[in-house]
Amino acid sequence: MDMQRADAGATSSLGEVVRRIGDDVKTIASDELQLAKIELSRGMKTAAADAAAIVLGGVVALIGFGMLCVTAVVALEPMIPPLWARMLIMAAIYLVAGGAVAAIFTRKLKTDANPAKSDAVEEAKATVENIKRGLSPDRVQHAK
């Protein structure tokens, strides 16, 4: 009888330990996901602030560039008498410069807002993989 009680106590203790390990794994996974969400949220807020600054800077630069082009149109009058030709040249300059600026900042915004390169996302993926592997000490890997 004493042997049965000892076995029952060991089994319930083992069951309790397994249940606690399961709860701990769930907590760790939940915390990793929460951390990833927070980091992604911060990254998106930073990207949105950068985009707003780019737009504001672009508007101010566009006004200055417009004034510079008006000056150039007036200054080119002795060399190119027709006004339409001078305006066409300035429009082409605007198109080229605007396209180049938009392309540069679009690339920058894409790299700033890329959540796939986040450390928290990589760590969360590693945690999920470790859980899938069974968490044996020789199989556990950390994100690089």
Image (spheres, helix red, strand yellow):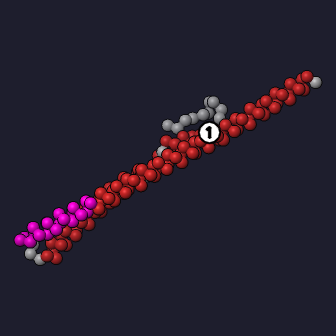
Q: Is residue 107 visible?
A: no
Q: Position of residue 95 (x, y in %)?
A: 26, 66
Where is residue 42 shown, x and y percent of the image? 47, 48
Q: Against 49, is 3 above or below?
A: above
The answer to whether 109 appears left or right of 144 in the picture is left
Identified at 81% across, 32% down, the residue is 12
Is the stretch drawn in magenta largely helix, strand or loop? helix
Image label count: 1
- Could you tell me which residue is drawn at 86 percent across and 27 percent down? 7
Q: Is residue 41 visible?
A: yes
Amino acid marked by disc 1: Ile
Rendered-image quadrant of the N terminus: top right
Q: Nearer the viewer, residue 51 or 8?
A: 51
- Magenta residue span: 60-79
Residue at the left extreme, as displayed: 78
> What residue sits 49% from the left and 37% below the top?
144
Mark 1: give few (<14), some (14-19) or many (20+) Cα within 10 Å.
some
Of all residues, the one furthest to the top in this rendering is 2
Tell me which corner region of the image, top left, top right, bottom left or bottom right, holds residue 53: bottom left
Residue hosting label 1:
28
Give the residue at x 37% y 57%.
52
User: As displayed, is residue 27 above or below residue 65?
Assistant: above
Q: Is residue 74 magenta?
A: yes
